[in-house]
Image (cartoon, grey):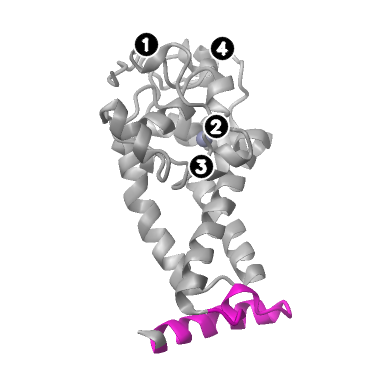
Amino acid sequence: MNLAFDSLSADAIQWGGALGWGGLAAAPWPTWIKLVVGVLVIDLLQYALHVAAHYVPWWWRLHKIHHSDTSMDASTAIRHHPLELLVNAFVLVFLFAAGGMPLFAILLYAALQQVHALFCHANLGLPPAVDRWLRQVLITPDMHAVHHSIRMDEGNSNFGMVFPWWDRLFRSYCAQPAQGHQAMRMGIAELAAGPRLSLLDLLWLPFWKVGQAWAQTVPKSTGRRSPNKRR
Ligand SMILES: [Zn+2]
C-alpha cells in the first residue's frame, strides 16, 4: 500500500516539480498525515471555489443552473452546467499542481465528495438531534438546503462541500432558514416568475440576458411551473 501511495505521490511531486516546488506530496510527513491534510485542503479549495462561483458574475451565470432547482433531491447533486464542471476542473488541476497535492488524497476526496453530494442534496429530514450532532462534522441535507434558499442572504451561506468547518470559520454559516424548512422556497428569484425550463433552456441560460421578458428569452418554454416537492 505504501509503495502505491509513494508512487502516486511521485506523480504529484512531478507536477509540482514543474513549478519548482514539491508541495504537500514532497512533505516529510507520514502518508496518513498527508492524506488528512490533503483532503482538508481540497475541501477548503472547494469552499473557496464555491464562494467565487456565487460572487464572480460570469461564474454565477454557470453555477446558477445548480440553484435553479425549485425542489432539492439527490438529482440536484448532478444538476451542473457542463462549462461549470470544466471551469472547476481546470482551476482545481492548476491548484493541485501548484500545491503538489498527492494523488491518493485527490482520489479519496473525489470518492467522498461524490457520495456526500448525493446525501446532502437528498430530500431527507434527519431527526433534529441527529442533524445537530452530525452537522458538527459533516454537512447535512438541512444545512445544505439553506444554501438553496431563494433568499440570497441565505443562498450566500453554507458554501461548504463536505465539511462544515469552513463556513463557521469564515462566518458564512447559517443554521436554519428564516421561514423554516417547511415554508422556505428554493430556487432563484429571477427565475421564480418564469416558466418551467427544459434541459436545453438550462444549457442556454448562462448566455441569456437576465431580466428580459420570458417570452423573448425562453422561446421553447412550456409555461408550466415546477412543483415544490421538498417538504
Ligand atoms: Zn451554490
Query: Could you tell me what secondary structure mostly forms the magenta stretch?
Result: helix
Q: Nearer the viewer, mark 2 or mark 3?
A: 2
Q: Is residue 191 magenta?
A: no
**Observer-nearest residue: 23 or 201?**
23
Q: Badge 3 is on which residue?
A: 160
The quadrant of the picture occupied by the C terminus is: top left
Helix, strand or loop under label 3: loop
Q: Name the amino acid, label 1.
A: Ala
* Magenta segment: 3-29
Please determine whether, in this image, residue 173 is positioned above or below residue 221.
below
Mark 1 or mark 4, which is nearer the start of the sequence? 1
Q: Name the amino acid, label 4.
A: Ala
Q: Badge 1 is on which residue?
A: 183
* Distance Cα–Cα, label 3 vs label 1: 23 Å
* Distance Cα–Cα, label 2 vs label 1: 20 Å
x%, y% of residue 90?
58, 59
Mark 1 or mark 2, which is nearer the start of the sequence? 2
Q: Badge 4 is on which residue?
A: 213
C-beta proximity under 8 Å, tags 3 and 1? no
Label 1: few (<14), some (14–19) or many (≥20) C-alpha neighbours in 10 Å: few
Q: Nearer the viewer, mark 2 or mark 4?
A: 2
x%, y% of residue 83?
53, 47
Classify mark 3 as within 8 Å of ligand 1 or not, answering yes or no: no
Instruction: Using the image, tell me which numbered label, if any, was put on residue 59.
Output: none
Helix, strand or loop under label 4: loop
The quadrant of the picture occupied by the N terminus is: bottom left
Q: Badge 2 is on which residue?
A: 173
Helix, strand or loop under label 1: helix
Determine which quarter of the picture holds residue 183: top left
Label 2: few (<14), some (14–19) or many (≥20) C-alpha neighbours in 10 Å: many
Q: Nearer the viewer, mark 2 or mark 1?
A: 2
